[in-house]
Image (cartoon, rainbow, N blue to C red):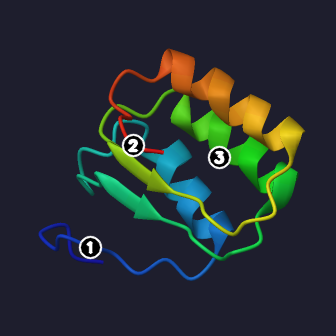
C-alpha cells in the first residue's frame, strides 16, 4: 500500500477498523476522510468504529449513511465524537 496516495482501497469494515486501531494516529496513512456509506455495518460495526475513533488523531470526515445503525450504535458514535477533537463531519 502506498503511503503517498490520497486514498486507499479498503474492502471490508474489518480492514478499516484494523487500520484505525493499529495506526492510532494514522501518520503513515494520513487518512482524513473515511467513506463507509452503504456497508450495512449496523450497531456492532458502529461500536467497533467508535472504539477506533476515540484514539484517532487525523480523521476529519466520516460518512456512514445507509448502514443500518440503530440507537445503540449512534450512542456509541456520539460518545466517541465527544472524545475525538479532529472529527468535524459525521
Residue farthest left in this picture: 4
The relative height of residue 60 versus residue 54 in the rendered view (above or below) is: below
Place of residue 32 in the rendered image (x, y in percent of width and height, measured from the top left): 28, 51
* Number of residue marks: 3
Measured Cα–Cα span from mark 3 to mark 1: 19 Å
Image coords of residue 14 (percent x, y): 67, 65
Q: Are marks 3 and 1 in contact (CB under 8 Å)?
A: no
Q: Residue at x 27, y 57 (%)?
A: 29
Tell me the mark number nearer the camera, choosing from 1 and 2: 2
- Residue at screen point 18% across, 70% down: 6
Residue of label 3: 49
Q: Quadrant of residue 78?
A: top right
Q: Quick one: quadrant of the N terminus?
A: bottom left
Say which residue appears at 35% left-offset and 35% top-offset: 88
Residue, disc 1: 7
Secondary element type, mark 1: loop
Between discs 3 and 2, the one toward the N terminus: 3
State the image coordinates of residue 86 (x, y, percent, origin top left).
Answer: 32, 29
Is residue 84 toward the left or the right of residue 11 in the image? left
Mark 2 Cα-neighbour bin, 10 Å: few <14, some 14–19, many ≥20: few
Give the labeled residue for mark 2. 89
Q: Nearer the viewer, residue 14 or 60?
A: 60
Amino acid at each position: 500500500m502506498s503511503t503517498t496516495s490520497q486514498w486507499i482501497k479498503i474492502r471490508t469494515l474489518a480492514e478499516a477498523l484494523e487500520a484505525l486501531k493499529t495506526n492510532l494516529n494514522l501518520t503513515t496513512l494520513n487518512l482524513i476522510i473515511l467513506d463507509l456509506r452503504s456497508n450495512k455495518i449496523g450497531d456492532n460495526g458502529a461500536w467497533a468504529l467508535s472504539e477506533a475513533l476515540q484514539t484517532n488523531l487525523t480523521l476529519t470526515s466520516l460518512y456512514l449513511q445507509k448502514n443500518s445503525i440503530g440507537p445503540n450504535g449512534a450512542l456509541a458514535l456520539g460518545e466517541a465524537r465527544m472524545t475525538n477533537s479532529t472529527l468535524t463531519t459525521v
